[in-house]
Image: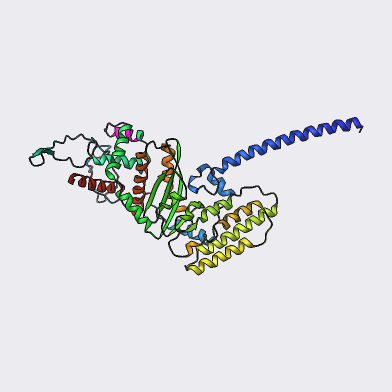
Amino acid sequence: MTEKELRAENVQLKQQLAEALKMIAKLEKENKKLQGQLGKFLNENTPPGSVPPYLKEELEAAFPPETSEAQEKEDEGKQAKLPNTRNKRPKPDKTKTHKIDTCPKCKRKLRPLGKKQRKIVIHFELPKAEAIEHISNGGYCADCKERFYASVPDTLPNSKYSLDTAIFIVTLAIAYNMTQRKIAELLGRFGIPISPASVNNVYHNVKKYLGDKKYREFEQELKNSMHTNADDTSHRHKGKNFWIRLVKNAKIVFIRLSKTHNSKDTKTLPLGKYSTTDGYRGYDKAGSILQRCWAKVSRKARNPKFYFTDEWEIEQYKNFVADLFKIYHDAKHTIGRGKDIQKMFDKRLKELLLKPRKEERNLLRLMNYLLEYEGEWFTFLLRNGITPTNNPAEIDLRPLVIKRKISQHTWSEDGLRCLENFYTLEETCKKRGADFADLLRHEIEGNLAEMRKT
């Protein structure tokens, strides 16, 4: 091969190399973009319930959850014991007998059979609206120099809708996350003429006569409780970023909406003596003994931030994660409770973290996160009832997240207070097996009775 041919071939190879480098740069840019999009659904801050259904199978296949064999057997047992309620029929409220005397084909008289067929059918009657005129008799008091008229029962002052209708509107908005326009359309089908603006007025009117008494009672009960879970998420108010702060225990869910998200606000939350939280540092000065969330550690471990460059890095990372969750599962299934048991598992975790290893970015990131909250990973071993994960709070935040996606914003200070008050009462009623509508009626009627006395 001549020198001229070698030069030509060299130029051609350089051109091919330049094109390959361009293609690699393009692919890396696209890959970075896809990683960023995937990060919205797959990171340590994303609860499992918010992952889109079309991504769940792929993510579970790529990152199987860290569970022990004992936990898997326990879950299988629970699933096997669940009763099949799909075809369950209720007990009948009334009985109707249907007779047949002639043959449907030839019209000949039938001979009666001793056997009868029985069938339970569920009937549903649509509600009907009726406009009732209330005539109140009045009287004049010579001492007070005033006229008085009999009050109309089961209605709010200066409202043309009954108390039942007003409570039904609030229940649709809170328990079923319906918009004001959809509520107006639904009530229109029942013969109740109402506009979305009127729905909004009724919604705020209920809050006005409900007051904050029950809301403050739940807040005080949480302050006196032994263990709570706390979590937060963003909220949009007049186009600006606000925060939904949630604190809960087994029987109460408390919601507060605030403009700021800092340690000063966190101190005012009704946290119990022990609190399970995520990694937010604002809880450090809240006065509770903290338990940090192991579910977030699991999500962080399953989502390494950087690419692995060698096989030994992958193997080392997998071994560390396996050893870490072996300690966690041993702690979770420990029967005893107390300070000594907590110290024993703190020691096991520290020994794992101090074990000599080769330096690698993903492993350092995970280890630094664990060391940052040293002493707060096994608080749940101090006493029964403390949860090692913050999943209960994340689950109770979901209705508000769904409401935020549907309604997008709140537009007034009254709207903020309505949202936090109604959701506190509704979610607490769920926990206690109580009826949200009955609670509203009881509180409003009590407040109206007090107003009439004064």
Q: Is residue 64 left or right of residue 276?
A: right
Residue at image point 61% right, 64% down: 351
Q: Is residue 127 left or right of residue 56?
A: left
Up the image or down, 212 lies above or below 228; here it is above
Residue 88 visible in the displayed image: no
Given the current orientation, which residue lies at the most extreme right position? Answer: 2
Residue 350 in percent (x, y) is at: 59, 63
Up the image or down, 342 lies above or below 237; here it is below
In terms of image quadrants, where is residue 132?
top left
Residue 313 in percent (x, y) is at: 68, 53
Residue 185 part of the magenta segment: yes
Q: Quadrant of the N terminus?
A: top right
Q: Quadrant of the C terminus?
A: top left
| Coloration mode | rainbow
Residue 180 part of the magenta segment: no
Residue at image point 18% right, 42% down: 153
- Give the magenta range: 182-195
Total of numbered circles in the picture?
0
Residue at image point 73% right, 36% down: 21
Residue 155 visible in the displayed image: yes
Task: In this rendered view, identify the residue nearer to me: 354 or 59.
Answer: 354
Q: Is residue 116 left or right of residue 60?
A: left
Residue 123 in percent (x, y) is at: 28, 42
Task: In this rendered view, identify the residue nearer to me: 232 or 119.
Answer: 232
Q: Is residue 189 left or right of residue 408?
A: left
Residue 396 in percent (x, y) is at: 42, 49
